[in-house]
Amino acid sequence: GAVVSQHPSWVICKSGTSVKIECRSLDFQATTMFWYRQFPKQSLMLMATSNEGSKATYEQGVEKDKFLINHASLTLSTLTVTSAHPEDSSFYICSAGTGFGYTFGSGTRLTVV
Amino acid sequence: GESVGLHLPTLSVQEGDNSIINCAYSNSASDYFIWYKQESGKGPQFIIDIRSNMDKRQGQRVTVLLNKTVKHLSLQIAATQPGDSAVYFCAENGIDMRFGAGTRLTVKP
C-alpha cells in the first residue's frame, strides 16, 4: 500500500530558529500534498495544499511567509516553520495523494522553547 | 465555506458492544468520503471509504452508511475492542481534504 514517510517525528527548537519537516511518498507519486496542524484534543486544521511544481495554496489565516512549503518533486514536500515561536508548538501532519485516496504521515511533534 | 462536521465529540462504549459514529457533511457535490482513525500521537489511518453511488460499504468489523438525502455518514464498528479507542474523523475527498472535529471513542473493558 501507499506509504508516506514524515521526518522528524519530533523536534525541539529554540525560539527564533527555523525547522524543516519532510514528507515523502515512498512508493507512489503524489501530485498533491496537504499540510495540517493539530493542537491537543482538537481536529486537524488544514494549513495549505501543495501541488508539484506550483506554489502552495494557503488557508485563510495561515502566514505563507512563516510556513514555507516546497513541493519540488512528486515524492517530496517540505514545510519550514521560520522564526519559530512557542505558539507554533503543535503536531504537524502531512498527507499525500494522487487525487483519489490519501495517505497520512506519522506526524511531527514540534516544541519551541 | 462548506465543511464536514461531526455530531458527537465523545463516545464511550463497553467492550464487545457495537459503536456508531456519525458525521454530517454540507457539500452536496461531494462524491467520495473516507473514515480515518487517529490514535494518540499518530497520523490518521484510513479505515474505509465510500463513493456517493453507494449507500453502504462493509469492511472487517466496520460498516459505513451514506445517506445522501440528509447528507449524513455513519461508521459502525462491530464488537468494539479496546484497540478501537481513538479519534475518528470523516473527510470529503474532493479538491481538498477537510476534517470535522472528530469523535473520541473510548472503549471500557
Image: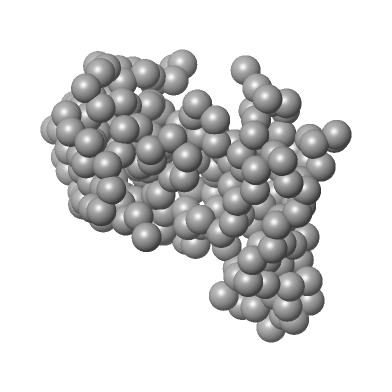
Name the residue nearer the viewer: B62 or A10.
Answer: B62
**Residue at 66 percent of width and 52 percent of height:** B103
Residue at 61% of width from left, 77% of height from top?
A: B82
Tell me the quadrant of the picture where the C terminus of chain A can be found: top left
Drawn side of residue A88 relative to residue B21, left or right: left
Q: Residue at horizontal 25%, vertical 27%? A: A52
Q: Which one is in front, B2 or A21? A: B2
Left or right, B14 with respect to B62, comes to: right
The residue at the point 69 percent across, 83 percent down is B109
Horizontal and vertical percent position of residue A38: 45, 42
Which quadrant would the N terminus of chain A be assigned to in this image?
bottom left
Could you say where residue A32 lies in the image, as x and y percent from the top left? 35, 32
Could you tell me how many numbered marks the image carries?
A: 0
- Residue A113 against residue A73 in the figure, above or below: below
Q: Position of residue B71 (x, y in %)?
A: 78, 35
Which scheme is used to colour this image of the protein?
A: one colour
Residue B51, given in percent of the width and then of the height, sits at 65, 43
Looking at the image, the residue that sits furthest to the left is A17
Q: Judge by depth and name the residue closer to the eye, B54 or A68.
A: B54
- Depth check: give the residue in front, B62 or B17: B62
Q: Is residue A37 left or right of residue B50?
A: left
In the picture, measured across the screen, residue A41 lies left or right of residue A56, that is right
